[in-house]
Every structure is written in structure tokens, then in C-alpha cells.
Image (spheres, rainbow, N blue to C red):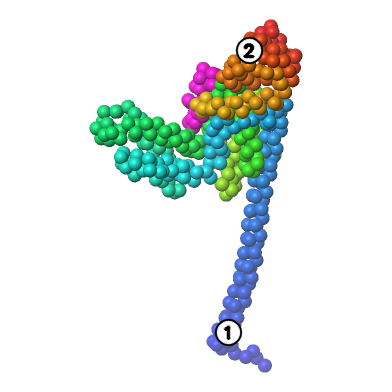
């Protein structure tokens, strides 16, 4: 018997069955591919999360050890730290960045609240400048604050024009401008600290720069923000190279540090966090290689979207030596002057009592001696250090005697240097 004849209908049925089988195979393959895709995606997400957690954990561990080292050296005494003024509050805006923008918006909108504020706005026709939304850019808020500050200044200086415009209310408005100017200046500082990728904190000796930077590091660690705290004295290389070598990267990836930081930046973007590099007391490192490279380091790390850098420097040295290195930067740091913030009498008295209790100075200190100590935080600090556990009454102060005793104390702990010969 021969094969039955294949009709056109049978041929079509065979083709339909063949296409269905191919479709089932492709569909099954697609499901496998989709499943693998999800598995790979989940794995990558977990790996990225693990990478950020481990990165934060390792750099924060380094910072914790550095804080302990400062503690042993006596440069940071947690028990002595007192939030005397708004220095730490300002730097919190740098640390938390755009997450704290809503605070600025709220404070800005409350600048002219109450009856006096509404009257001031109406008289000077400020309604268009007095409200911003949470969607307003920081740069726009900063420009509006500048406009307000210029207005307040002109109100104080161009007396004739405003006297004709405001009549008897001019004298009230001019006095109010001083208070509003203070509030606007503080908000302008906050805006600058949020917007800048790098900040340089300057202050005189004994003003607590190391205490401030250590406290800020501890706040970062508590909030699981990666922060690398570095003592400038330890940097014995090009500043950028030294920091890159401290990153928790395997030796095989050292040459790919820039790529690593870009990946970390991407992962931190998802978390709405930044990686912070803190370098304390740049004026204490005189190595030529370090000094010549500090400005370049600021520029290098500023190019990464989620990396920020903060440095501290003694104000005297900054003006005479270090300022020129940052003037050349493409990303000039925002200069935050600790001396510009006011220490009220209540705060300095609190510090005096804290020092007295911590160093166990039990003798009576005359009012005249106390007033001199309150006038200089540096003098007060070394006075209590050299008078630790003293029980005698102190009637008057001799500055040279205090400094001599302090140098003697330092010389006894550092045998390598002959301080008295110097």
C-alpha cells in the first residue's frame, strides 16, 4: 500500500501544530529567561546593598579608631564637649545635606510671621520674596536671601529715601532690619553648607575644631553615614593618593578607585546619603607634598556626585599660607568661620564649670581670674589641664606661668623634642 495522499488541509494542520510547538518552546524559554532575569536582578540588588553596608561599616570603623586616637592624645575629650553655639548645628546641614532642606524652607517662611512681620512685609512690599515651597531650589532660596540682605542693608544706609517712603514707620523698620538680617544670614549659611561639596572650617587655637569634627563624625556613624576621619599629620603622601589607599578596596582594584567611587556614589544616591571625608588640622602637616596636593584633593573628590570633603585649619595659618592653595581650586570650598559665631556668657560659664569638675580643680578661683579665663577658651583649657587635682585657692593669674607649666607637661610626655631649647 502506498502512503495516503496529503491534502492541503492536512498540510495546514501539520503547520499549525508545528508552530504551536515552537511557540510553546519559545514561551517556556522566555519564562526561564524571565526567572533568571529576576534572580540575577535580586542578586545584584542584594550585592549592592551588601557593598554599601560593608563600605560604610569599614570606613566608619577606621573613623572610630581615629576618634579613639584623638582621645588618647587629649585632642578630643567627649566629656568636655559642650555645644556652645550654632557651629555644630550649621555643620549638621552639611552632613545631612538636602535631607534637611525642608528645615530651611520652614524657617524661611517663618521669617516674617506675627503682626510685626506682616506689617514689615506690607510696608516694604515684600510679599513676592517671603514664601518658598519645598520644591524651590536651594540656589533660588539663596538668591532670595541675598535680595533680602541687600534690602536690609539699604534700609540701614539709604535713610533719606526710605524715610520719605515709610514716614514715621521708618525708624521701626530700620531697627527690625537688624533682627531680620541675623535670621537671613543664618539661613544663608545653611544654604551654602547644603549646596557646597567641600567645606573648610577655620578657627583659632583652642576653639574646639577637633572636638567639633569628632562630634560630627560620631553623629554620622550613629546615622549610618559613611565618614572617613583623617589626622592630617598621618598623611605622608600626595593627599589624594593617601585617601584612595585608605578606601576599603582590594589591592587588585586599587587602580580602579575612581570607578569604585562612582559605583559607591550610585548606591548612596539610592539611599539618599553621601560619603564624607574629614581631614583635621591641615596646618599641622608641613610636608611639601601634602601642602601642594591638598587643593587638588578637594577638586578630585568633588567630581564624584555623592562624595563630600570637610577640612579644618587654624585661622592664623589659613590667612598667611593655606588660603592660596584653595583659591586655585575649580571647586572652591565654602569657608565656615567658627569665630563668626557668638559664644554667650551662659555657654562659657557652663564650659568653665565642666572643665573645673572634669579636672577636679577644687580651690576657689577669684572673680578677676575667672573673667580672664572666660575671655580665652584656649587659656581656660590649658589652665585647667596644668592645675588638675589642685586644691589651693587661685587669686590671680600669670599667663607666662600657665604657659610654662603647660610646656613642661608636654615636654615630659614627648622626649624626642627639646622644647626648652626651642
Q: Position of residue 307 (x, y in %)?
A: 57, 38
Q: Residue furthest top?
A: 421
Find residue 397 and name its label.
2
For marks 1 and 2, the one nearer the N-term is: 1
Choose between 175 and 245: the one closer to the eye: 175
Q: Say the numbered circle drawn on residue 270.
A: none
Q: Is residue 279 above or below residue 118?
A: above
Magenta residues, start to end: 315-338
- Image quarter (top left, top right, bottom left or bottom right) of the C terminus: top right
Tell me residue 103's x, y (percent): 50, 43
Residue drawn at x 65%, y 40% is 221
The answer to whether residue 189 is seen in the rendering is yes
What is the C-alpha distance between the residues marked 1 and 2? 111 Å
Residue beneath disc 1:
13
**Quarter occupied by residue 245:** top right
Q: Which numbered mark, 1 or 2, is in the foreground of this view?
A: 2
Q: Residue at x 71, y 10 (%)?
A: 418
Q: Nearer the viewer, residue 210 or 405?
A: 405
Point 66% across, 60% down: residue: 39
Task: Residue 29: name its quadrant.
Answer: bottom right
* Residue 249 percent location from the top left of the image: 67, 39
Label 1: state its secondary structure: helix
- In this rendered view, identify the residue nearer to me: 7 or 287: 287
Task: Indicate whether residue 354 is drawn in magenta.
Answer: no
Is the residue 384 above or below the residue 221 in the image?
A: above
Amino acid at each position: 500500500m502506498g502512503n495516503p495522499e496529503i491534502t492541503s488541509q492536512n498540510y495546514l494542520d501539520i503547520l499549525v501544530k508545528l508552530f504551536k510547538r515552537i511557540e510553546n518552546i519559545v514561551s517556556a524559554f522566555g519564562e526561564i529567561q524571565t526567572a533568571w532575569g529576576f534572580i540575577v536582578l535580586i542578586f545584584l540588588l542584594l550585592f549592592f546593598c551588601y557593598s554599601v553596608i560593608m563600605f560604610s561599616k569599614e570606613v566608619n570603623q577606621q573613623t572610630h579608631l581615629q576618634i579613639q586616637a584623638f582621645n588618647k592624645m587629649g585632642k578630643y575629650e567627649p566629656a568636655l564637649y559642650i555645644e556652645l553655639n550654632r557651629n555644630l548645628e550649621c555643620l549638621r546641614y552639611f552632613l545631612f545635606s538636602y535631607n534637611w532642606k525642608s528645615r530651611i524652607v520652614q524657617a524661611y517662611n517663618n521669617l516674617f510671621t506675627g503682626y510685626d512681620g506682616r506689617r514689615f512685609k506690607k510696608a516694604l512690599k515684600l510679599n513676592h520674596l517671603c514664601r518658598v515651597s519645598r520644591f524651590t531650589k536651594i540656589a533660588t532660596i539663596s538668591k532670595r536671601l541675598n535680595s533680602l540682605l541687600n534690602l536690609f542693608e539699604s534700609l540701614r544706609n539709604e535713610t533719606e529715601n526710605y524715610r520719605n517712603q515709610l514716614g514715621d514707620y521708618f525708624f521701626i523698620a530700620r531697627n527690625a532690619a537688624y533682627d531680620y538680617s541675623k535670621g537671613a544670614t543664618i539661613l544663608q549659611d545653611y544654604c551654602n553648607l547644603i549646596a557646597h561639596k567641600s567645606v573648610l572650617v577655620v578657627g583659632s587655637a583652642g576653639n574646639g575644631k577637633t572636638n567639633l569634627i569628632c562630634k560630627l563624625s560620631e553623629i554620622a556613624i550613629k546615622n549610618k553615614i559613611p565618614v572617613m576621619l583623617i589626622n592630617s599629620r598621618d598623611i605622608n603622601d600626595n593627599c589624594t593618593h593617601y585617601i584612595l589607599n585608605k578606601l576599603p578596596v582590594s589591592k587588585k582594584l586599587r587602580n580602579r578607585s575612581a570607578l569604585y567611587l562612582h559605583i559607591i556614589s550610585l548606591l548612596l544616591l539610592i539611599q539618599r546619603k553621601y560619603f564624607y571625608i574629614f581631614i583635621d588640622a591641615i596646618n599641622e602637616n608641613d610636608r611639601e607634598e601634602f601642602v601642594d596636593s591638598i587643593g587638588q584633593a578637594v577638586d578630585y573628590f568633588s567630581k564624584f556626585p555623592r562624595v563630600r570633603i570637610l577640612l579644618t585649619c587654624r585661622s592664623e595659618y589659613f590667612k598667611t599660607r593655606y588660603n592660596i592653595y584653595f583659591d586655585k581650586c575649580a571647586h572652591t570650598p565654602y569657608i565656615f568661620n567658627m569665630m563668626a559665631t557668638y559664644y554667650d556668657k551662659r555657654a562659657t560659664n557652663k564650659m568653665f564649670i565642666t572643665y573645673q569638675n572634669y579636672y577636679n580643680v577644687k580651690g576657689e578661683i577669684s572673680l578677676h581670674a575667672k573673667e580672664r579665663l572666660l575671655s580665652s577658651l584656649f587659656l581656660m583649657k590649658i589652665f585647667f589641664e596644668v592645675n588638675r587635682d589642685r586644691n589651693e585657692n587661685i587669686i590671680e593669674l600669670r599667663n607666662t606661668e600657665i604657659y610654662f607649666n603647660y610646656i613642661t607637661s608636654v615636654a615630659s610626655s614627648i622626649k624626642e623634642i627639646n622644647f626648652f631649647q626651642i
